[in-house]
Image (cartoon, rainbow, N blue to C red):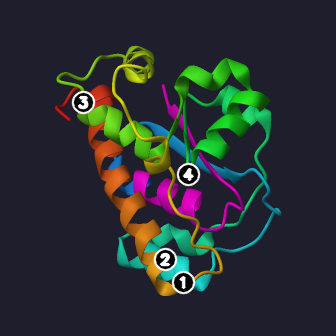
């Protein structure tokens, strides 16, 4: 069975496609399908050159073929896991597809919650439920759960976003690999 992962940001140009590509790399060889979408995306736009350069540098070669697409509620309903660039995106997904709320996390939230788990529950729905149950227990600063939007901004913002996404995807990938392949996080 293929695990369906959706990554959401605003324009589906920088953060969500970069995260989707880095998750593909982190989860290579596992039965996962990863898509990305934007809450305000215009369909068919390519990844900006600055983000593409970061994606390539981080090993996400397929990013060159990315084309943006607008988020639809069915995307979240059909996904086993929804990861968002920020709390506004998580809120948007929760309002559009309330049935996906317990399996929707920001990238940084998921990564930080995963770090607090001593053991990785299996199967995936149990792992996601365990993470969601930790939300009120683990005190995460809401201001620290958003990946800065680098679109149209200078190199420093590009670096900050790429670094945050890369680190989160490493942690998320390790957790999911432990859940899906039976390894340790």
Chain-order first, disc 3 or disc 4: 4
Is residue 45 something that shows in the picture?
Answer: yes
Q: How far apart in space, not on screen, are marks 3 and 4 (Cα)?
A: 20 Å
The image quadrant of residue 55 is bottom left
Q: Nearer the viewer, mark 1 or mark 3?
A: 3
Mark toward the start of the polypeptide (1 vs 2): 1
The percent coordinates of residue 137 (x first, y second) are: 35, 20
> Is residue 111 magenta-colored?
no
Query: Pointer 2: what residue?
Result: 158
Packing grade of label 3 (10 A; few <14, some 14-19, many >=20) is few
Position in image of residue 17 (x %, y %): 57, 60
Residue ID for mark 3: 116
Q: Earlier in the sequence, mark 1 or mark 3?
A: 1
The image's mark for residue 177 is none
Residue with the mark numbered 1: 50
What element does badge 4 sit on? loop
Query: Do the residues bearing badges 1 and 2 touch, measured as CB atoms within 8 Å?
Result: yes
Q: Is residue 46 left or right of residue 29?
A: right
Dot 1, how many residues are within 10 Å of its Cα: few (below 14), some (14-19), or many (20+)? Answer: some
Q: Secondary structure at mark 3?
A: loop
From the viewer's perspective, is the residue at label 1 or at label 2 nearer?
Answer: 2
Q: Position of residue 120 (x, y in %)?
A: 25, 23
Gap between marks 1 and 3, in whole Å? 33 Å
Please state the horizontal and vertical placement of residue 146, each as a whole percent of the image: 51, 52
Q: Is residue 31 above or below residue 58?
A: above
Q: Is residue 30 visible?
A: no
Q: Are marks 1 and 3 in contact (CB under 8 Å)?
A: no
Q: Which residues are magenta?
A: 1-23
User: What is the distance, in whole Å, between disc 1 and disc 2 at their CAs?
Assistant: 7 Å
């Amino acid at each position: 069975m293929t695990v369906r992962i959706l990554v959401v940001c605003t324009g589906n140009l920088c953060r969500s496609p970069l995260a989707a590509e880095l998750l593909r790399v982190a989860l290579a060889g596992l039965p996962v399908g990863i898509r990305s979408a934007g809450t305000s995306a215009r369909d068919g736009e390519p990844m900006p050159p600055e983000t593409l350069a970061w994606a390539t540098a981080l090993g996400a070669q397929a990013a060159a073929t990315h084309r943006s697409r607008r988020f639809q509620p069915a995307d979240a309903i059909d996904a086993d896991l929804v990861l968002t660039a920020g709390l506004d995106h998580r809120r948007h997904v929760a309002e559009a597809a309330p049935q996906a709320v317990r399996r929707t996390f920001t990238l940084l939230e998921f990564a930080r919650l995963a770090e607090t788990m001593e053991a990785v529950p299996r199967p995936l729905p149990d792992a996601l439920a365990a993470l969601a149950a930790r939300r009120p227990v683990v005190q995460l600063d809401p201001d620290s759960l958003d990946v800065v939007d680098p679109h149209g901004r200078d190199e420093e913002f590009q670096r900050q976003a790429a670094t945050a996404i890369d680190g989160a995807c490493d942690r998320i990938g390790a957790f999911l690999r432990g859940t899906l392949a039976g390894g340790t996080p």
